[in-house]
């Protein structure tokens, strides 16, 4: 079997899908994207495909991964790692279809029967948070995630800290003692600010506190983990085993590799195994489309230290299209008491609606994340 063609599709709301075709008729799909840099990743996908994949045997996944990540002198980073990630997913999809098995079966078989998932709740005011969390609990979810704060100074004021606590209190009151919520700081705080903000969260016992500091300050995150009893999470902006190692050594409790950023199924699997040696759970980051979620689920079902899956079905910030618009078998992504069931189809276990994808290609206006500023006009983390 040989790879004959690699195509990419830029589709709303902000996703990039890739399709690898073979001379035996088998086709694999993946999702290589960096949110806000889809066009840049698209160029990288085609460059890598032309250089390493077209004409090659798709079943030599690891050899392709080695060449795509190491075959150029300059390597790594979000753009290249995400391009490799989507291509790697598509190669695993082909392998699963070639062997007639879901990817998690090729990786050792299932270690669980269902995967717990959380959904996002928006809302800036505690009353809104209470209402939104209650709605998700009524929909069957047992866990939610929300922003820990709005725009904040690197050293939060007393008012900022009160707001962090009030939001967490609203979530905890809506959930009671059995449900879980996680909060995400998006790296908006300095180390010193994070230590104070995490302390303010302690009474409400979030499941984890995400990105209290920026990924480039991961070498300092140990000061946060040592200051608190709360589990600290990071990893959506770390792209390889080498990049997660300092976080693991710093005592984080939860690692959040993104299957579409961190080198695909191949590298995320290795990251999960590495995390296991540090007694750290993985909660794959996934605000993306159907193939990123399908790839994440394949990892979830063969990973003993999997904690919970992020997903963005029906999320408030998607405009123009929805995750389920691009699949012909939405049952795969139906929630059962806040869990996703084990996918049993071959490969990634999801059927892409190719006509819908081709129709949507190019319909997405370029998406970029907002740029925030502090009241004095200086740049603020979003
Ligand atoms: Mg996050």
Image (cartoon, rainbow, N blue to C red):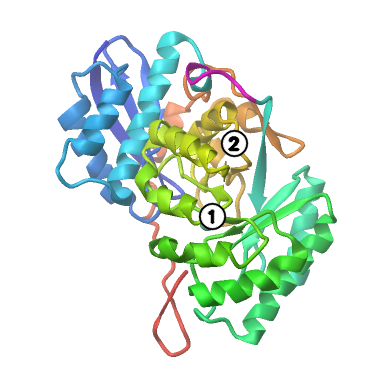
Observer-nearest residue: 73 or 348?
A: 73
Given the current orientation, which residue lies at the most extreme bottom position? 376
> Percent from the top left, x then y, of residue 188?
50, 71
Classed neighbour count for the residue bearing mark 2: other residues with Cα under 10 Å, few (<14), some (14–19), many (≥20):
some
> Percent from the top left, x then y, of residue 244?
42, 49
Question: Of helix, strand and loop, which mostly describes the magenta segment?
Answer: loop
Q: Quadrant of residue 228?
A: bottom right
Residue at 59% over, 18% down: 344
Which residues make up the magenta segment? 105-111
Q: Image height check: is 154 above or below 228?
A: below
> Percent from the top left, x then y, of residue 155?
53, 81
Name the residue that disc number 2 marks. 305
Q: Quadrant of residue 237?
A: bottom left
Magenta stretch contains residue 109: yes
Residue at 47% over, 28% down: 353
Observer-nearest residue: 107 or 246?
A: 246
Is 130 positioned to the left or the right of 114 in the image? right
Reading the chain from its start, which is encountered first: label 1 or label 2?
1
Can residue 125 be seen in the rendering of this structure? Answer: no
Q: Image height check: is 151 above or below 179?
A: below
Can residue 272 be seen in the rendering of this structure? Answer: yes
Observer-nearest residue: 49 or 300?
A: 300
* Disc marking residue 32: none
Q: Considering the image in quadrants, where does the N terminus appear? A: top left
């Amino acid at each position: 079997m040989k790879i004959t063609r690699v195509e990419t599709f830029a589709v709303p709301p902000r996703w990039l899908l890739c399709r690898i075709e073979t001379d035996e008729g088998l086709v694999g799909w993946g999702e290589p994207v960096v949110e806000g840099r889809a066009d840049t990743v698209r160029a990288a996908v085609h460059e890598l495909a032309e250089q390493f994949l077209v004409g090659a045997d798709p079943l030599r996944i690891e050899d392709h991964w080695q060449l795509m990540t190491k075959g150029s002198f300059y390597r790594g980073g979000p753009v290249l790692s995400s391009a490799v990630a989507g291509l790697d997913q598509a190669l695993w999809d082909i392998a699963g279809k070639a062997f007639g098995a879901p990817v998690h079966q090729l990786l050792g078989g299932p270690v669980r029967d269902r995967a717990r998932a959380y959904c996002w709740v928006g809302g800036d005011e505690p009353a809104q948070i209470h209402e939104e969390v209650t709605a998700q609990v009524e929909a069957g979810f047992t866990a939610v995630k929300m922003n820990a704060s709005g725009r904040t100074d690197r050293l939060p004021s007393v008012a900022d800290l009160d707001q962090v606590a009030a939001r967490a209190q609203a979530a905890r009151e809506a959930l009671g003692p059995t449900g879980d919520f996680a909060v995400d700081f998006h790296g908006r705080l300095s180390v010193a600010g994070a230590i104070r903000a995490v302390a303010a969260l302690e009474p409400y016992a979030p499941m984890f506190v995400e990105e209290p500091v920026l990924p480039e300050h991961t070498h300092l995150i140990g000061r946060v983990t040592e200051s608190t009893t709360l589990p600290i999470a990071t990893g959506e902006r770390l792209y390889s085993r080498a990049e997660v190692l300092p976080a693991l050594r710093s005592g984080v409790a939860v690692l959040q590799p993104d299957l579409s950023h961190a080198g695909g199924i191949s590298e995320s699997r290795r990251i999960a195994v590495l995390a296991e040696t540090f007694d750290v759970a993985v909660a794959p980051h996934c605000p993306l489309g159907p193939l990123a979620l399908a790839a994440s689920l394949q990892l979830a079902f063969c990973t003993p230290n999997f904690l919970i899956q992020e997903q963005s079905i029906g999320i408030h910030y998607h405009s123009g299209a929805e995750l389920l618009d691009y699949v012909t078998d939405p049952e795969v992504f139906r929630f059962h008491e806040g869990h996703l069931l084990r996918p049993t189809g071959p490969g990634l276990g999801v059927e892409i609606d190719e006509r819908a994808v081709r129709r949507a290609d190019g319909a997405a206006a370029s998406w970029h994340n907002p740029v925030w500023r502090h009241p004095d006009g200086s740049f603020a983390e979003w």
